[in-house]
């Protein structure tokens, strides 16, 4: 995981650590997601857009698991603007605020 990419994606300062602990407890569904992603990447010769999206979702899930296993005081600091999807939607709206509406 590229730390700079992950910090930008989660809107963290450049000096903030990505993980509060060295070990992360992963739920069984996350292990299965990793196995499914590995199978998908092993079966295909190239990485397509869907695979890129799934990789990003998996990384987000791992980072969310790390946040969940963090001590309470670390979670309080991080939770100020945690959901990357909301930040991404706001950035998209700001970038297109003066565009014409398209009803296609």
Image: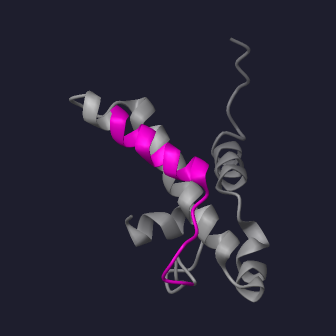
Q: Residue reaching furthest front?
A: 28
Q: Residue at x 42, y 44 (%)?
A: 35
Q: Residue at x 56, y 56 (%)?
A: 60
Quadrant assignment, res 47: top left
Quadrant assignment, res 40: top left
Secondary structure character of the magenta stretch overall: helix
Image quarter where the N terminus lies is bottom left
Q: Residue at x 74, y 14 (%)?
A: 103
Q: How is the image coloured?
A: one colour
Q: Residue at x 50, y 86 (%)?
A: 15
The residues colored magenta run: 21-40
Is 38 included in the stretch rendered in magenta? Answer: yes
| Left or right: residue 91 compared with residue 16 | right
Is 103 included in the stretch rendered in magenta? Answer: no
**Residue 20 locus on image (x, y percent):** 58, 84
Q: Residue reaching furthest top?
A: 104
Image quarter where the C terminus lies is top right
**Residue 88 locus on image (x, y percent):** 64, 50
**Residue 23 locus on image (x, y percent):** 51, 78
Q: Is residue 72 visible?
A: yes
| Left or right: residue 38 compared with residue 14 | left
From this view, report whether residue 5 is shown above or below residue 46. below
| Left or right: residue 40 compared with residue 65 | left
Out of 80 and 32, give the one closest to the viewer. 32
Quadrant assignment, res 67: bottom right
Numbered disc total: 0
**Residue 85 locus on image (x, y percent):** 67, 49
From this view, report whether residue 96 is shown above or below residue 28. above
Out of 38 and 16, give the one closest to the viewer. 38
Q: Is residue 11 visible?
A: no
């Amino acid at each position: 995981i590229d730390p700079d990419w992950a910090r930008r994606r989660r809107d963290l300062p450049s000096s903030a650590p990505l993980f509060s602990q060295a070990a992360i407890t992963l739920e069984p569904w996350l292990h299965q997601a990793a196995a499914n992603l590995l199978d998908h990447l092993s079966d295909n010769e190239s990485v397509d857009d869907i695979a890129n999206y799934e990789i990003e979702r998996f990384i987000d899930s791992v980072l969310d698991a790390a946040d969940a296993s963090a001590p309470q005081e670390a979670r309080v600091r991080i939770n100020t603007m945690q959901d990357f999807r909301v930040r991404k939607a706001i950035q998209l709206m700001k970038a297109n605020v003066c565009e014409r509406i398209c009803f296609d």
